[in-house]
Amino acid sequence: MATYQVEVIYQGQSQTFSADSEQTILESAQAAGIELPSSCLSGVCTTCAGRVLSGEIEQPDAMGVGPEPAKQGFTLLCVAYPRSDLKIETHQEDALYDLQFGQPR
């Protein structure tokens, strides 16, 4: 089991926490006392969407992220596991929605 450093960025503010390779990024953030948006916790709803700016993740159960957005770094933090140190922009639900469906909500 590996441990990585994850930096989450929202509106210019940055927070860093340790993330275990066997826990989702959302679980690790919550354990560190960092509140991030979430809802279904099963990789479907996109409430916890983020965008990986650097690093590697594994997200086999991210049904709410299509192949093209995934190539662009979009992730669902409730089902994403760290595979390296990471830098992630959080609160990306609207951007992911716009990319996948082509129109703002």
Image (tube, grey):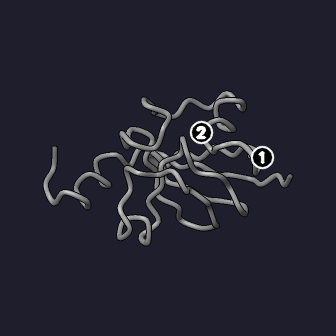
Horizontal arrangement in the rendering, residue 66 relative to residue 42 (left or right): left
Q: Which mark is residue 26?
A: 2
Q: Quadrant of residue 2?
A: bottom right
- Counting from the top left corner in percent of width and height, residue 38 is at 46, 32
Which callout, 1 or 2, points at the residue further toward the start of the chain? 1
Mark 1–mark 2 distance (CA, rounded to whole Å):
11 Å
| Residue pictured at 46% horizontal, 43% vertical | 43
> Which amino acid lies under the numbered mark 1 shown in the image of this protein?
Asp
- Counting from the top left corner in percent of width and height, residue 46 is at 37, 43
Q: Which mark is residue 5?
A: none
Which quarter shows the C terminus?
top left
- Counting from the top left corner in percent of width and height, residue 15 is at 64, 43
Q: Quadrant of residue 102?
A: bottom left
Q: Which mark is residue 20?
A: 1
- Counting from the top left corner in percent of width and height, residue 6 is at 68, 52
Horizontal arrangement in the rendering, residue 97 relative to residue 90 (left or right): left
| Residue pictured at 39% horizontal, 42% vertical | 44
| Residue pictured at 28% horizontal, 47% vertical | 94
Circle 2 SS class: helix
**Residue placed most toward the observer, 41 or 14:** 41
Circle 1 SS class: strand
